[in-house]
Amino acid sequence: MIETFITSFKLQNTYRTNSIIYSLKQLPLIKRILPNSLYKNRGLKIFASIISILWEIINIFIGKILYILLMIFTTLTWYHTNQADTFIHIFVFLTFAGGMLNTYMLNPTKDKYYAIILMNIDARKYGLSNYYYQLIKLVVGFLPFTIPFGTIAGVPLWIQIALPFFALAIKLIVMNYSIYDFRKTNKASNENLPTKIVWGFVAVCLVLAYGLPAINFVITPSIFLCVFIISIILGIYSLVKIHNFKDYRRMYKQVLTESNVYMQERKAGTQVIKDTSLKQIELDKNYTSNKSGFAYFHDLFVKRHSKILTKAVKKQSIVILGLFIAMIIGISVNDTFKSKTNEILMVYLPYFVFIMYCINRSSSVTQVMFMNCDHSMLTYRIYRTPKVILGIFKERLKTLIKINLLPAVLMGGGLALLLYLSGGTDNPLNYAILFISIIAMSIFFSVHYLVMYYLLQPYNVSTEMKSSTYKVVQGLTYIVCWYMIQIQMPIFSFGIATIVFCIAYCLISLFLAYKYAPKTFKLRV
């Protein structure tokens, strides 16, 4: 089994190494320097292998610290319950939810597909060796963070050490049940396609995790001890059952189909989105437009694709409106909640950069534009002329801003209203700055993603994303927005800075788009 694991690790590392080299070949300037024989270069392959191994090590810990920090530790201040008990309580119920969503073994990854289906490696040895490796990573990744964060929260040391092993036991129990279900129904579950029952169970766990502490009910150490002992006993029993199970190949043949393995790629940019989009295009209606030229062409596109372009935004707006109504009720009946809300609003405006990043639909809309228009139109020379590109760009920018404006207006207006109702501010300008800065963020992301699309057009004719530069810029955008969560600044200071930055960025980006888009907006090979 150890030899099988070593082989599987080499396979994964080779796949990652080649992916890294391919990504380097896609970067501008660098791709001209690097030769086509790059994959044969031993030195570069060693370098890429080192990066791959380092990423594997980092990956063991980074997810766990973010999980404990964001999902558990930062939420402790929300409640008046004992922090140690609340830490334990949330961890337990989130572990139940995570156990159902992520079994490790039933995740149809490419390396499993290559090894078991294409290379005919022993399915049981491959599955078990990698499963045990993932369980070891789970414990090793959690321990360095359950101890320090648990200590700060006042959790007893034995529980700090026990929590990772409790998570391990839950993973084993769920996997054993999956094997039992396979034996009973002869159908293997795919963890990337959770059933309604699984989603319902996860939803209940989340409500129990964050809802019960609000009514002063949490799991105490004595209750956890009972749950832990039962889990360990069932976990050991499950481990024996999992290890002795013989029919892994038949189970993996059901899980590791091409449709399952490549599902994420299709979701990210190809057939699933195209099929879904086609169903929502309104071709049966006689849409007309009083516009002309590029504006006419774009206006008809927007009308025929209105369901795709605005459906998510409408749902977002309903959710935002509901949240603000709930917040208004909360500050009306609870003075502590009222004062805390006012305190947060006065210094946490940077946090809303990340929220506006999450709700902005520009990235999805540009993808729809490519799949339902540009991937065909770019094959015509007339569509690639500067006059046409810049004409369509201008119309699309107006549309993107309009699409994202509804949730932005609700968000900005709701925050200003909450600030007023929760106690207000000494500086009346804060209300206007709060509202305008949220609108500025929305316009910023609309411009940012459209300019990215035109300057770095990432798709080929098959609607596959081929631009590493586009992915890098996407990643940097996420990192910057995520970093904003850590910043606390007064509304006036951060709001003015945000508005000025957004105006400057938009002007510079639009200038670059007008200058370079006619050269860069083309189909990738």
Image (spheres, rainbow, N blue to C red):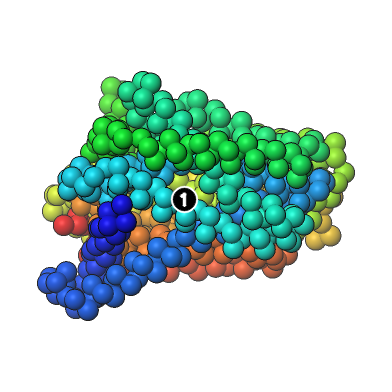
Q: In this view, does 11 lie above or below 122?
A: below
Asked whether, in this view, residue 172 is left or right of residue 233, the answer is left
**Which residue in the protein does label 1 denote?**
135
Q: In this view, does 16 lie above or below 72?
A: below
Q: Give the percent coordinates (x, y) of residue 233.
A: 58, 38
Q: Is residue 467 above or below residue 194?
A: below
Task: Examine the rendering and report whether any part of residue 492 can be seen.
Answer: no
> Hey, which quadrant is residue 292 in on the image?
top left
Q: Give the percent coordinates (x, y) of residue 22.
A: 23, 64
| Dot 1 alpha-carbon crowd within 10 angstroms: few under 14, some 14 to 19, many 20 or more | many
Q: Give the percent coordinates (x, y) of residue 370.
A: 28, 46
Q: Give the percent coordinates (x, y) of residue 411.
A: 62, 45
Q: Which of 107 and 162 is in front in this view?
A: 162
Residue at screen point 74% across, 36% down: 212
Residue at screen point 43% across, 57% down: 447
Asked whether, in this view, residue 411 is left or right of residue 118, the answer is right
Quadrant including the C terminus: bottom left
Residue at screen point 64% across, 55% down: 161
How many callouts does the rendering have?
1
- Secondary element under disc 1, as helix, strand or loop, is helix
